[in-house]
Image: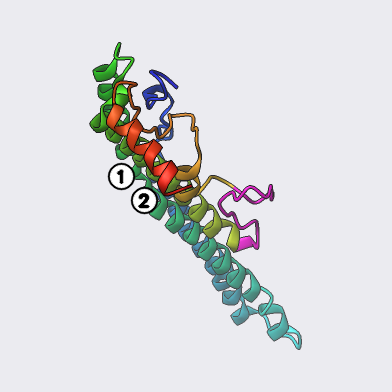
Amino acid sequence: MVNGGAINPGTIPQFTGNLGELETQRGLLHGAAGQFRDAGADVHARFQGLSAFYTAPEAEQLFATTGPVKAESDVFADQLESVTTALSEYAAEVRPIEARLKQLKADATAFVAGISGDKHWKDDGDKVEENNDLVKDVNAAVAAFWEAERTCANKITALVCGTHFIADDGTGKSNMYGFSEKDLDSTKELPWGSQVEESRRWWEVHHHVGSFLKGVFVDG
């Protein structure tokens, strides 16, 4: 952290992937699903075409053998298409989060520049509030990004009865990934900064006297 606990723009997470490339690969995968389905159907149809030239007691059983090929091809193609849908929804959800994190980094950079050299910036309630709002906004964006990742992964792993990911609650389970916004907000220090309290200078007698009297007459 920099400048007495102020938000650190350099450690605000940024999306490092390429959503455009993801969309391109998603489209190719969707096309492959259709080709796989068509191939299974074609195998079955071509084999059935031989029935006009083959007559035997076992013919019906023989020509039924390619039915499962067509059926399994359909199932696999459906799964591939489900993956492409999950990826498309992930891209749509992450795109605004990516932009939000970039903007928050720019806002944090401007804020830190504004308090540069000011050792007593925490005496200013407005600056304290701005810092804390920035930290909370980063928390929200990062938590939303982790949630989008978990949601996408769970849609895909569910197709093969795989791992279902959940937010980390501190219990150390192997299927935990990322943290909730609530947990980030309650964490005292984060890589990108911390929420701070407005400080009081020693000459702010009214505050200290008020705190003292409250302790004596209210808290005992």
- Most extreme residue toward the right is 57
Query: Residue 121 got which mark?
Result: none
**What residue is pinned by disc 1?**
96
Q: Is residue 32 visible?
A: yes
Residue drawn at 24 percent across, 19 percent down? 114
Q: Quadrant of the N terminus?
A: top left
Colour mapping: rainbow
Mark 2 → mark 1, Cα distance in angstroms:
7 Å
Residue at the image point whose x is 39% and y is 45% from the top:
140
Q: Amino acid at mark 2?
A: Glu
Q: Residue 199: percent from the left, percent from the top? A: 35, 27
Q: Quick check: is 175 in the magenta stretch? A: yes
Judge whether 209 appears above or below 28 on screen: above
Residue type for callout 1: Pro
Where's residue 86, x and y in %? 45, 56
Asked if residue 204 lies left or right of residue 148, the reply is left
Residue 220 drawn at (x, y percent): 48, 47
Residue at point 58% right, 70% down?
Answer: 70
Write down the residue under mark 2.
93
Q: Quadrant of residue 59?
A: bottom right
Image quadrant where residue 203 sits: top left
Q: Residue at x 50, y 36 (%)?
A: 188
Q: Residues within 10 Å of mark 1 (few under 14, many from 20)?
A: few
First to last magenta residue range: 159-176
168 to 18, vertically: above or below:
below
Q: Tell me if mark 2 has few (under 14), some (14-19) or many (20+) residues whose alpha carbon lies within 10 angstroms of its own.
A: some
Q: Is residue 28 visible?
A: no
- Secondary structure state at the residue bearing disc 2: helix
Question: Which of 28 and 102 lies nearest the eye of the viewer?
Answer: 102
